[in-house]
Amino acid sequence: MSDTPTNLDALRERIDSLDNDILRLISARAECAKQVAEVKTRSDPDSVFYRPEREAQVLRRIMELNTGPLDSEEMARLFREIMSACLALEQPIKVAYLGPEGTFTQQAALKHFGESAVSLPMAAIDEVFREVEAGAVNYGVVPVENSTEGVISHTLDSFMDSSIRICGEVVLRIHHHLLVSEATLRDKVSRIYSHPQSFAQCRKWLDAHYPRAERVPVSSNAEAARMIKGEWHSAAIAGDMAANLYELEKISEKIEDRPDNSTRFLIIGSQHVPMSGEDKTSVVVAMRNQPGALHELLEPFHRHHIDLTRLETRPSRTGMWNYVFFIDFKGHVDEPRVAAVLEEVRLRAAELKVLGSYPMGVL
Ligand SMILES: O=C(O)C(=O)C[C@]1(C(=O)O)C=C[C@@H](O)C=C1
């Protein structure tokens, strides 16, 4: 087909007509969501509107049905936004995240809840926990582990003294860029700002390209991006959101040492999330300090063929030589075999706390 004006006009007419259909269908869907809200409120005035298990099922179904030409993740992202707008019609939700604005955690919050959620930056991980606990926001988003640098212990420790539950997870590919402002003299960069985790994730690249530049650790990548405004000899390592927010230019893109560098974030809240079909559970267990304790703890999981996805040890804050284990595994507490394992573990452990069962990250 040649790109003649007639063909272009005809195709655009077809696009207009398809857009009419899409518009009508999205509106009908939004009407439906409003009715869902009425049903929920009628059945329980304190009902929660956000349903992570249902959202995961909607997105998974779309990805399965999709036959292209858009790829399934792209299609799911579009539906993510439609659902986000539908939920905002039911009840606008507020989400606290580890700020400041422009951090990867904000990007994770947007990826999970879509653009219609109101997201509020907090200065520290404990503040995110506190805001959720106090009911000032509906949910919180905090980083929990990075594929290159490992666990974010502050987040794990925050669960120890909190009644907060995990309602979801989101995994984000982390791409770091070397950013400069309009004031920077590019061949005179002698100082680079970033978060310590980002320095660690780009160590080899920095050693090869800027071995002599001073590396200045700051509290977040977004803060690093803010710092270089007006400093002619400085650059920052940060992601796309910070680059856009502070209108910085990328002089080198994707400088992370490992191409699969990704961070897992948790969605924290107070609700029990029903099964979605593909779920994970997180627990924290304190074992008595005796030989073979770890084996005793893990043996029931092995016997019931439960797939562990993560095991993390943290010193307990109550005794000098006691440790607690954070365990993630596939399955949901409402499944009989998971309930059976947890019952066995409860008998063997000094303490067991279920942090939550939640849908495995879809996007
Ligand atoms: O199914 C529901 O419970 C809805 O509220 C509808 C809907 C959707 O748009 O599909 C919206 C928000 C919920 O988080 C889940 C799904």
Image (cartoon, rainbow, N blue to C red):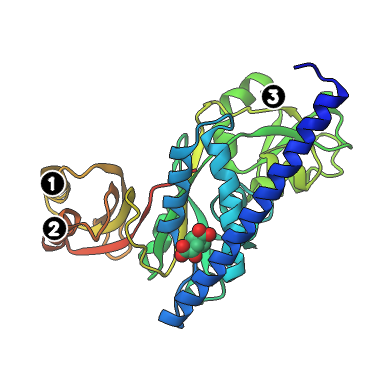
- Mark 1 or 3, which is nearer the eye? 1
Label pair 3/2, CB-CB below 8 angstroms: no
> In x, y percent, where is residue 232?
86, 36
Distance of label 1 from label 3 (alpha carbons) = 51 Å
Three-letter code for the amino acid on which mark 2 is drawn: Ala
Residue 105 to residue 174: above or below? below
Q: Quadrant of the N terminus?
A: top right
**What SS does tag 3 mark?**
loop
Q: How many marks?
A: 3
Q: Residue at x 85, y 26 (%)?
A: 6
Distance of label 1 from label 2 (alpha carbons) = 9 Å
Three-letter code for the amino acid on which mark 1 is drawn: His
Q: Quadrant of residue 183?
A: top right
Three-letter code for the amino acid on which mark 3 is drawn: Tyr
**What SS does tag 1 mark?**
loop
Query: Which disc, if any, is residue 90?
Result: none
Q: Residue at x 45, y 75 (%)?
A: 40
Q: Camera-side residue: 308 or 148? A: 308
Q: Camera-side residue: 149 or 53? A: 53
Residue highlighted by disc 1: 304
- Give the mark nearest the N terminus, 1 or 2: 1
Q: Report whether residue 19 is seen.
A: yes
> In x, y percent, where is residue 249?
80, 34
> In x, y percent, where is residue 284?
29, 58
Q: Residue at x 60, y 62 (%)?
A: 30
Image side of residue 319 versus residue 108, left or right? left
Label pair 1/2, CB-CB below 8 angstroms: yes
Residue highlighted by disc 3: 210
Q: Residue at x 83, y 44 (%)?
A: 229
Distance of label 3 from label 2 (alpha carbons) = 55 Å
- Please rate how many residues cluster around mark 2, counting C-alpha atoms within 10 Å: few if below 14, some from 14 to 19, many from 20: some
Residue highlighted by disc 2: 340
